[in-house]
Image: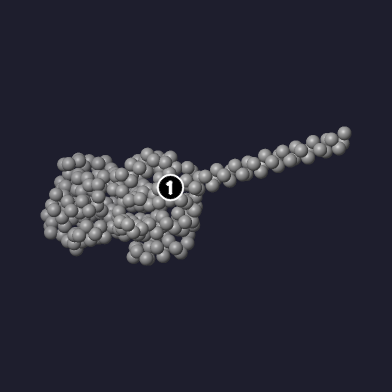
């Protein structure tokens, strides 16, 4: 009787051990499956943060940051460039998509899994230096002029919320080169831009940035650039990216990336 009972206890322990082992194996397989999923990072061509180079790999400060995260999080991922409106729509609706260099706002808050901040820019109205007739001391003053911005950019939402009217005093482009071509051609009076990117984009468009001036800093718009994932992206991937970004921001590598691209140093709390 004692021997039989001892045998049953051993069998029960074996069963419990087997179940525990099987559970661990299943969790490991699920984890591996999540990591193995193909992730697409989407953005727009926006030097010096992200620069599309045709057949060559993309480059830029934000590209270096994203590549660092991909490697640290051990993700199978690619970086794809589209006009901003398309990148935004893909990130809204597709699974396993991460979008980067995006401004954060209350309206966008519930639409994405926010991974973290990567840099800060300041928003400005810009005009040609020859336009001595333009006087702006407030956003309200800008309503008497034709203002250009990018479709689905936070600037578009901001201007609409402040009473600008499409095709009246608000003109929306899908790409930054078109935005600046419209300003230089006189189709718009003002371009909505930021403190870091405008000179690079104008030069790449084949225009002269020395003919442009920043005339008014927008006081009440979000200026922090973020990485965010679509709501259809597994939380395991989101958490891995959050952990990797926290690690990057706490390391010297982050400042090294900014210095490489001649961007002002910035301290972001991990």
Question: SS for tag 1?
Answer: strand
In the image, what residue occupies the spot 75% across and 40% down? 13
Q: Position of residue 71 (x, y in %)?
A: 47, 56
Answer with left or right where residue 84 lies relative to residue 40: left
Q: Residue at x 37, y 39 (%)?
A: 93
Any part of residue 135 in sight = no
Front position in the image: 115 or 121:
115
Q: How many numbered badges does the structure rendering display?
A: 1
The residue sitting at the front extreme is: 55
Q: Which of 84 and 36 is in front in this view?
A: 36
Percent across and percent down for residue 162 are: 25, 42
Residue 57 in sight here: yes
Horizontal relation, residue 229 to residue 213: left or right:
right
Q: Which residue sits at x=29%, y=51%?
A: 219
Q: In this picture, is 13 found above or below 42?
A: above
Residue 188, image x and y in percent? 16, 49
Q: Name the residue under label 1.
A: 39
Query: In the depicted view, which residue is nearer to us: 165 or 40?
Result: 40
Question: In the image, is residue 195 above or below residue 21?
Answer: below
The image's colour scheme reads one colour
Crowd tier of the residue under label 1, counting other residues whose Cα lies within 10 Å: few below 14, some 14–19, many 20 or above: many
Placement of the N terminus among the 4 image quadrants: top right
Q: 17 above or below 70?
A: above
Residue at 36% from the left image edge and 58% from the top image edge: 57
Image quadrant in which you'd find residue 111: top left
The x, y position of residue 103, in whole percent, is: 34, 49
């Amino acid at each position: 009787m004692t021997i039989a009972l001892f045998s049953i206890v051993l069998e029960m322990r074996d069963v419990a051990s087997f179940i525990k082992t099987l559970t661990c194996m299943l969790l490991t397989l699920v984890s591996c499956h999540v990591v193995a999923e193909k992730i697409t990072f989407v953005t727009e061509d926006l030097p010096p943060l992200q620069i599309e180079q045709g057949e060559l790999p993309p480059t830029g400060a934000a590209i270096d940051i994203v590549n660092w995260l991909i490697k640290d999080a051990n993700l199978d991922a690619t970086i794809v460039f589209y006009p901003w409106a398309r990148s935004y729509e893909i990130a809204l609706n597709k699974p396993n998509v991460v979008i980067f260099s995006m401004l954060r706002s209350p309206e966008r808050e519930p639409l994405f899994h926010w991974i973290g901040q990567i840099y800060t820019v300041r928003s400005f109205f810009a005009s040609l230096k020859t336009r001595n007739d333009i006087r702006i001391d407030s956003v309200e003053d800008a309503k008497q002029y034709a203002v250009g911005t990018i479709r689905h950019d936070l600037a578009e939402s901001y201007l609409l919320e402040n009473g600008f009217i499409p095709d009246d005093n608000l003109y929306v482009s899908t790409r930054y080169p078109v935005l600046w071509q419209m300003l230089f051609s006189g189709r718009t009076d003002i371009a909505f831009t930021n403190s870091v990117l405008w000179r690079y984009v104008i030069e790449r468009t084949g225009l002269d940035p020395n003919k442009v001036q920043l005339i008014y800093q927008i006081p009440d718009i979000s200026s922090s650039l973020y990485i965010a994932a679509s709501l259809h992206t597994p939380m395991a991937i989101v958490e891995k990216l959050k952990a990797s970004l926290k690690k990057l921001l706490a390391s010297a590598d982050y400042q090294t990336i900014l210095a490489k691209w001649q961007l002002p140093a910035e301290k972001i709390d991990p």
